[in-house]
Amino acid sequence: MSGHSKFANIKHKKEKNDAAKGKIFTIIGREIAVAVKEGGADPANNSRLRDVIAKAKANNMPNDTIERGIKKAAGDADSVNYETVTYEGYGPGGTAIIVSALTDNKNRTAANVRNAFTKGGGSIGTQGCVSYMFDEKGQILIDRSECDMDSDELMMLALDSGADDFNEEDDSFEVLTTPAEFTAVREALEAAGVPMADAQVTMLPQTYVTLSSEDDINQINRILGLLDDDDDVQEVYHNWDE
């Protein structure tokens, strides 16, 4: 069963420079703060926090940095005022883009996101204008070279734990779940010692758009680059087939 894997993009992100790594740590730090505020500082009683910790470890965030983030959020919970905001819009060539942000200033974030779209020849749309083209799924990516299990054994473990689908690529395995089953499946794989390159609830496109124009490719890369540089932006989902 083969699917469109994001594994190459994940590896590329993790191999970026220290500034990019700092951005990833900032993103995860905000997710930790929100998870602690919503469910407390004890991962045993807070499944969202457990998921964020797993994401932090997959991104090589040091344990002491994770612990400091939890303690800071627990001691300063009343001052954590991040709001989740989502923007939807269009990129060049009919591409669809969803931006998820955590912000303490919605006006600033909205202006920055709109600016990124405008500079790349795109446009912000209304809520729901492109999200219907995506499915919300739990996605777990496993580096094939780091996994001792064979594909059949791993597939059965994932499906028995509640996964919806299992995709096999040349360099990776992809496990897909419903958002509700994501934590249970991730924890089952973790308990079995399966190393995860990435694990999160994400938005997966139902179909992908190929861009043939060099100008369109440069424009969408400009949009994605500007969004990637914005500390408020947590995730960017798109249906461009890179």
Image (spheres, rainbow, N blue to C red):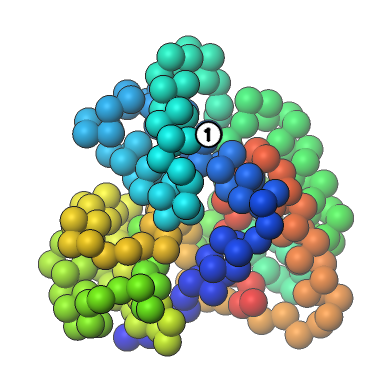
Q: In this figure, which residue is indicated by the disc labeled 1?
A: 30
User: Residue at coordinates 27% horizontally, 27% vertically from top-left?
Assistant: 42
Q: How many marks?
A: 1
Give coordinates of residue 61: x percent, y percent.
48, 46
Between 85 and 104, the one lying in front of the other is 104
Give coordinates of residue 53: x percent, y percent.
38, 42
User: Residue at coordinates 70% horizontally, 71% vertically from top-left?
Assistant: 94
- Rendering quarter of residue 172: bottom left
Between 52 and 103, the one lying in front of the other is 52
Residue 43 shows up from this direction: yes
Relative to 151, residue 61 above or below: above
- Rendering quarter of residue 198: bottom left
User: Residue at coordinates 21% horizontally, 68% vertically from top-left?
Assistant: 158
Label 1 neighbourhood size at 10 Å, few (<14), some (14-19), many (20+)? many
- Rendering quarter of residue 9: bottom right
Q: Does dot 1 land on a helix, a strand or a loop?
A: helix
Give coordinates of residue 70: x percent, y percent.
41, 28
User: Residue at coordinates 78% horizontally, 38% vertically from top-left?
Assistant: 111
Q: Quadrant of the N terminus?
A: bottom left
Q: Amino acid at mark 1?
A: Arg
| In this picture, residue 66 sits left or right of residue 100 | left
Residue 34 shows up from this direction: no
Between 113 and 30, the one lying in front of the other is 30
| In this picture, residue 20 sits left or right of residue 218 | left
Between 218 and 65, the one lying in front of the other is 65
Q: Quadrant of the C terminus?
A: bottom right
Give coordinates of residue 214: x percent, y percent.
83, 80
Relative to 93, residue 15 above or below: above
Relative to 208, residue 47 above or below: above
